Image (cartoon, rainbow, N blue to C red):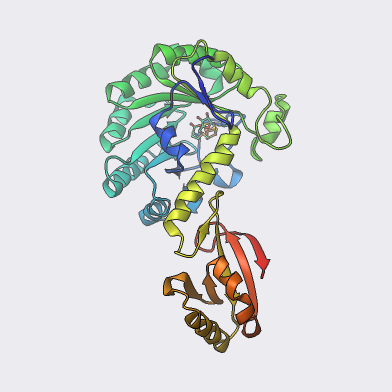
């Protein structure tokens, strides 16, 4: 694996697909189009709640196009990965979403699609016309041995002819050699995911003898080594580690959202959470006293915000003024929370 570039989180690659580059900087929105799927992969990570006719943009349930646009704006998305279930079971919706994203955010908004199917030429043509940039095929494990003779060969050839970037994306488990050779022959990239346990697949995975790598991760023991072994025979390949997904992708996305939504006085942490000071006021006179004190101390207007429960400001301003306002307020805290509207509170420290 001499030429493979390694990251601290255990990912490595000889080639990084365009869709992955944007994911690495937290700029890809995940659009989940239907949880329904005709396959029954033993490792399927889709949660039981999502295995229905649902649509999500990241974690936001979607009931109209506006939800998708708002989510993309909130994280300042530069691209979208369309996933599922099997998104192509709802082909017309997928085409509509690609067109929507391209018309709203411009052609340069990069869209990639996951599918476990081998779509016909007509579907590929329509996807390309709608503006799809990249397609990632996930053939089911029982077809890996005969992939060259399967319908995936034709789908891949057609996708390339229509100008799409083409890859195969599968979990790194025994049997990937044939797929690696095939991907090289057809000149598509091979994305290998470190196999992970999830609530929805744990039973089936255990019954097949898979075990956790450690108590601290969801990764399956031996998956990384399996990926490592095929590097010498693979062409363009990328191994995405479980730690990378958890530690980097999520954090980068949060930091992006935080930069977009943070007020002048919010501090953005390295984890992508925001920190600010909160003063609780149960009545108007408390609020008025605090505002008066802020004016006397010449706190700039944009360094505080009146809220339903009182007033919020920079954590360091609160620390400086705490003793002056304590008498007239109910409670004061330094708050750390996720950077969404009413985002989950990570920590609340009384001042
Ligand atoms: C979750 S699927 C969703 C889209 C679509 N249903 C499909 O399978 O292509 C996307 C990718 O996740 C990967 N994957 C599936 N189960 C996994 C697991 N338990 N651990 C790691 N990666 C997994 C597969 O490589 C697949 O290409
Ligand atoms: S194709 Fe994807 S969604 Fe369908 S069962 Fe397999 S992993 Fe789950």
Quarter containing the C terminus:
bottom right
Note whether 2 is above or below 91 in the view shown. Answer: above
Q: Nearer the viewer, residue 93 or 266?
A: 266
Note whether 78 is above or below 335 in the view shown. Answer: above
Q: Residue at 29% across / 44% down in the picture?
A: 102
Horizontal relation, residue 237 to residue 175: left or right: left
Q: Quadrant of residue 325?
A: bottom right
Q: Nearer the viewer, residue 332 or 316?
A: 316
The answer to whether any part of residue 54 appears in the image is: no
Quarter containing the N terminus:
top right
Note whether 80 is above or below 165 in the view shown. Answer: below
Q: Residue at 25% across / 34% down in the picture?
A: 129
Note whether 231 is above or below 248 in the view shown. Answer: above
Q: Position of residue 91 (x, y in %)?
A: 37, 38
The answer to whether any part of residue 347 appears in the image is: yes
Q: Position of residue 276 (x, y in %)?
A: 55, 65
Horizontal relation, residue 266 to residue 164: left or right: right
Q: Position of residue 157 (x, y in %)?
A: 33, 18
Horizontal relation, residue 115 to residue 98: left or right: right
Q: Position of residue 54 (x, y in %)?
A: 48, 48
Q: Quadrant of residue 51?
A: top right
Q: Residue at 32% across / 35% down in the picture?
A: 132
Q: Nearer the viewer, residue 73 or 8?
A: 8
- Count the marks: 0
């Amino acid at each position: 694996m001499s030429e493979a570039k390694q990251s601290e989180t255990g990912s490595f690659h000889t080639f990084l697909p365009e869709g992955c580059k944007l994911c690495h900087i937290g700029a890809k929105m995940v659009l989940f189009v239907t949880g329904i799927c005709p396959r029954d992969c033993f490792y399927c990570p889709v949660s039981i709640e999502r295995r229905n006719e649902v649509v999500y943009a990241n974690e936001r349930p979607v009931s109209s196009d506006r939800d998708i646009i708002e989510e993309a704006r909130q994280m300042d998305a530069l691209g979208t990965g369309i996933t599922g279930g099997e998104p192509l079971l709802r082909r017309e919706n997928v085409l509509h979403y690609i067109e929507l994203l391209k018309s709203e955010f411009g052609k340069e908004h990069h869209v990639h699609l996951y599918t476990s199917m081998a779509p016909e030429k007509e579907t590929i043509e329509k996807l390309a016309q709608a503006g799809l940039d990249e397609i990632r095929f996930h053939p089911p494990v029982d077809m890996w041995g005969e992939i060259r003779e399967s319908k995936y060969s034709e789908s891949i050839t057609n996708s390339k002819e229509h100008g799409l970037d083409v890859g195969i994306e599968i979990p790194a488990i025994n049997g990937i050699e044939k797929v690696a050779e095939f991907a090289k022959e057809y000149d598509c990239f091979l994305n290998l995911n470190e196999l992970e346990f999830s609530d929805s697949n744990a039973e089936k995975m255990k019954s097949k003898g898979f075990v956790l790598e450690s108590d601290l991760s969801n990764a399956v023991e031996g998956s990384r080594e399996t990926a490592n072994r095929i590097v010498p025979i693979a062409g363009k390949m990328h191994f995405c580690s479980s730690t990378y997904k958890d530690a980097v992708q999520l954090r980068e996305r949060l930091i992006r959202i935080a930069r977009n939504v943070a007020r002048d006085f919010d501090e953005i942490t390295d984890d992508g959470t925001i920190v600010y000071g909160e003063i609780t006021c149960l009545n108007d006179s408390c609020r008025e006293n605090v505002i008066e004190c802020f004016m006397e101390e010449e706190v700039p207007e944009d360094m505080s915000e009146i809220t339903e429960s009182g007033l919020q400001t920079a954590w360091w301003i609160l620390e400086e003024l705490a003793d002056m306002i304590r008498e007239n307020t109910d409670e004061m805290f330094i708050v750390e929370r996720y950077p969404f509207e009413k985002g989950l509170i990570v920590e609340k420290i009384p001042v």
